[in-house]
């Protein structure tokens, strides 16, 4: 960090990593942290972070037709990705698989985007 000294001279001020982290994660800061409990284990988490992946994914809908994913010559927009994801979720729901197999279906789908998002 560089600050002025009053006579036009710039001086370098260095703070430790721990102090920098404490400064940006403190109360009221953009990256404020707090303690959460998950299955009896306490973790430090960002206070303003989405509660789950679905909430984070929903926030990306604001980007519409901007590119979301590029794989070789394939390109997917945020809108297309949301539509494809919703179609996959509806298909799993129709098979009554949505809630208990999603963790097992996605890893078996392969690495190509078309296998992940429809």
Image (spheres, rainbow, N blue to C red):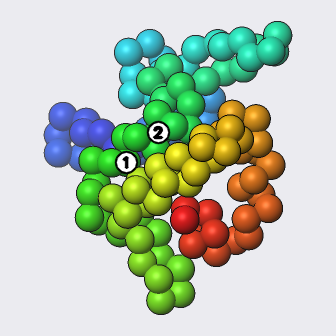
The residue labelled by disc 2 is 56
- The x and y percentages for residue 47 are 50, 20
Callouts 2 and 1 close, C-beta under 8 Å = yes
- Callout 2 secondary element: helix
Q: Residue at x 58, y 51 (%)?
A: 91
Q: Residue at x 55, y 62 (%)?
A: 117
Toward the viewer: 99 or 65? 99
- Callout 1 secondary element: helix
- Which circle marks residue 60 in the picture? 1
Residue 30: tell me if it is visible: yes
Q: Quadrant of residue 113?
A: bottom right
Residue 63 drawn above or below residue 41: below
Residue 66 drawn above or below residue 100: below
Toward the viewer: 39 or 22? 39
Q: Relative to 4, is 11 on the left or the right?
A: right
- The x and y percentages for residue 59 are 37, 41
Rate crowding at label 1 as few (under 14), some (14 to 19) or many (20 or more) other CA atoms within 10 Å.
some
Q: Relative to 60, is 21 on the left or the right?
A: right
Please identify the residue farthest to the bottom as the structure is shown.
73
Rate crowding at label 2 as few (under 14), some (14 to 19) or many (20 or more) other CA atoms within 10 Å.
few
C-alpha span from label 2 to label 1: 7 Å
Q: Residue at x 58, y 14 (%)?
A: 34
């Amino acid at each position: 960090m560089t600050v002025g000294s009053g006579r036009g001279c710039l001086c370098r001020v260095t703070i430790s990593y721990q102090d920098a982290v404490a400064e940006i994660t403190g109360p009221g800061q953009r990256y404020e942290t707090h303690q959460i409990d998950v299955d009896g284990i306490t973790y430090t988490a960002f206070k303003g972070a989405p509660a789950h992946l679905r909430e984070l994914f929903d926030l990306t809908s604001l980007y519409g037709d901007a590119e979301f994913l590029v794989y070789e010559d394939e390109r997917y927009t945020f809108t297309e990705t949301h539509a494809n994801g919703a179609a996959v979720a509806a298909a799993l729901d129709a098979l009554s698989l949505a809630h208990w197999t999603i963790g097992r279906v996605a890893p078996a789908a392969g690495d190509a985007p078309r296998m992940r998002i429809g």
